[in-house]
Image (cartoon, rainbow, N blue to C red):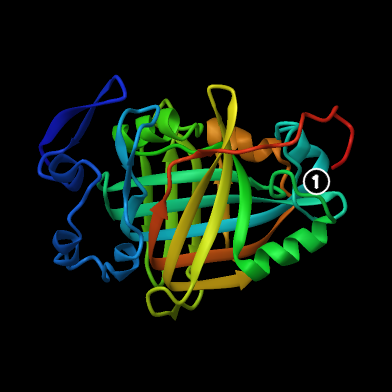
Amino acid sequence: MQPSVTVELGGHSVEVPEGGLYDRFRMRTDLDVVAADPRVPGVDFFRRLPKSRIDSPIGPTWTPNFYYRIATARVTMIAPTRAIRSRLPSELAPLELVPGVGLVSVMFFRYDVCDIDFYTEVGVGIAVKPARHGGLGPADLVTALKNDHLHSYVLSLPVSSDIAQVRGHDGYGFPKWRTDIEVDIDDEHATARVANEGGGTDVSFSARTPRQVRRASGEHVSNLTSYTTIDAAWHSTLSQTNVLAAGSAYLPRGVDLRLGDGRVADDIRSLRPIRTIRLDVMTEGQNALHLPVPTSVPNPAPRGEHS
């Protein structure tokens, strides 16, 4: 195992790899150093995104957080709106495919080179309408897909490193905890396993990787806005993904998503997913994760009313 050093972050002591990017640069990473890493496909995307130093719940830091090489797999499923609403804060409204049917997803992330060093992550999310936006669900969905900008509310987001847990929970307001997560993604297969508190299996996943389409850096940049609360105030977090090699399969066959015992599995079950409608796998990409900013959301609506 790589030796580690202890750093202070927002009142927490966390272990990070000795000589890693965080140990050396504290979020203000030298892009020329990263460009020399043979795993990194380039840094042009990041040169156009200057960092800013801001005060945050975890202390002064630089934003965005840069992910120089990542791979992801996303399983998108349809689920009853009634089940989805039972897990959503009343200020948010589900994005519906058709009346009574919404979209939920399980995502698996592998961050090979990052400002806070290597880690893996799994997320269970609900597609929601943009805050303070009316209109019909199907129209919202068409607009979101056309603009490649989705909005979500995350139920669970475990990670495999201490620094990712502290930053994600205290700095972003995400429901993060630390656990063992294995994620492997290549041109042939995508697999993952999330451990529960006892070392058993919370969730496991395997699928054949859809045919990958390569793109030049900056040609396809997708956006995701996530809503969280920090100190009881609503915030939105923007994530920008520079897609370099990715593929999708609609109504895919052979997707094996198994639910064991644990927090992630419980969140998925609570949404009562009906069937998988899409599998997205990105074998090579990059990401810029901005720190949350305050946002306005509607006043809570009584349960039973529809937005």
Q: Quick check: 54 above or below 104?
A: above
Residue 290, percent from left and from top: 43, 47
Q: Furthest residue to the top?
A: 11
Relative to 120, is 267 on the left or the right? right
Quadrant assignment, res 72: bottom left
Q: Quick check: 291 above or below 186?
A: above
Type of residue at label 1?
Answer: Pro
Question: Would you say residue 1 is visible in this rendering?
Answer: no
> Which class describes the residues within 10 Å of circle 1: few (<14), some (14-19), or many (20+)?
some
Relative to 235, is 215 on the left or the right? left
Relative to 77, is 217 on the left or the right? left
**Which residue does the image show at 76% across and 31% down from the upper left?**
90
Q: Quick check: 15 above or below 67?
A: above
**Which residue does the image show at 74% across and 40% down from the upper left?**
84
Residue 181, percent from left and from top: 38, 42
Residue 68, percent from left and from top: 30, 60
**Which residue does the image show at 22% across and 47% down from the upper left?**
28
Is 18 or 197 nearer to us in this picture? 18
| Residue topped by disc 1 | 80
Residue 35, percent from left and from top: 19, 66
Quadrant into which the N terminus falls: top left
**Which residue does the image show at 58% across and 64% down from the upper left?**
279
Q: Quick check: 81 above or below 4?
A: below
Question: Would you say residue 298 is visible in this rendering?
Answer: yes
Is 233 or 127 nearer to us in this picture? 233
